[in-house]
Image (tube, rainbow, N blue to C red):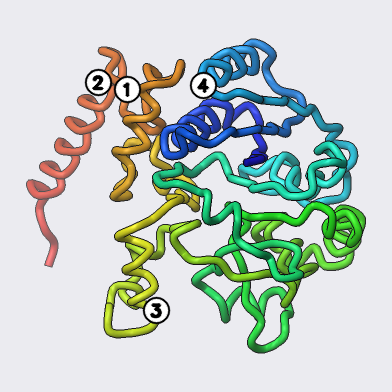
Amino acid sequence: MIIACTIDNNYIRHCAVMLKSLQLSNPTESLSVYILHGVIDAAERARLAAYLGEFLPSVSFLQLDEQMLAGFPVFGHISLATYFRLLLPAALPHAVEKVLYLDSDLIVVDTLRDLWESPLEGNSIGAVEEHNQEFDRNRLGLAEGSLVFNAGAMLIDLGRWRRENILANGLEFARTHPERIKHWDQDVLNSLLEARWRPLDWRYNALPHLWMHPEYTAADTPLGRQAERARTSPAVIHFAGSGVAKPWHHRCTHPWRQRYLEIRQQTPWGHLPLEGTPSTSLGERLGRLRFRVKKAGKAMLGRLAPRHR
């Protein structure tokens, strides 16, 4: 089974968790992993390589030239690394004709053998559909009835991607329609591959909306029944979103967060504090106390002040 993922400095530690979860859930698989990245911290990369070498038989780090992506829009907390997926056909050896791409903000909790063997039926990729279909379809200018997929887990026919020159066509789309790009390379791929991808079972990319939105909890509806199957027997848990949506944030409430944290403890980064954790230093505690006292004092003065009628 051939796996590809992408990292930048912020996702090195999360990639370690994802790949460890992959190995734990697929212990009998021979896994060959390609990790695409730009310029990253050498010491952290070495730490990741050493850790992965303990349980993966084949790991290749492929450093990419980000100038190849010049012209793609970036904003917010996102860097050009988000577009590295578009470089897969050029970065991976030409002999690799099929690859399973996995984001680094997910964990694997069941075997992926059936996913790996899924026929693509002449399509470029297999992926799981997004939940906000109408909004994204209209935003991207897709035809009525076209489905929009999430790019966090994709089974990719690399030969077809190479023939379709995804990178050049993607850059042309980004330059021509920058106003349509909200989800970066996912929007690019959905625009280029409209009606040319195969929908996969939701369990192979179980997204947060399966637990958050009421319409996906009613088992007596088609959506509800599919959602229930994905919730009760997921294979890939994708912590899509930002901030508290991530299991490494101390305020995350995702029901699979604890499994992420359990695997994280097995990595060299398990000792690090969770993001957003309130500081426990004496200085900061005193600062918060002074703020609360000052706020309470102002409220009391407000209550004691004479009222004019």
Q: Gap between marks 1 and 4, in whole Å?
A: 35 Å
Q: Quadrant of the C terminus?
A: bottom left
Return the disc, 1 or 3, that comes first in the chain's sequence. Answer: 3
Query: Which residue is labeled 1 in the image?
Result: 279
Q: Which mark is residue 55?
A: 4
- Residue in the image at 33% along x and 36% along y: 250
Q: Residue furthest bottom?
A: 144
Q: As drawn, is 236 to the left or to the right of 126?
A: left
**CB atoms at circles 1 and 2 under 8 Å apart?**
yes
Tell me the element at label 2: helix
Dots 3, 4 in contact, CB < 8 A:
no
Q: Who comes first in sequence, dot 4 or dot 2? A: 4
- Which residue is label 3 attached to? 223
Farthest front residue?
28
Depth check, mark 1 against mark 4: the one in front is: 4
Give the amino acid at mark 4. Phe
Tag of residue 74: none
Disc 3 is placed on an element classified as: helix
**What's under tag 3, amino acid-wise?**
Leu
Q: For mark 2, what is the residue? A: 285
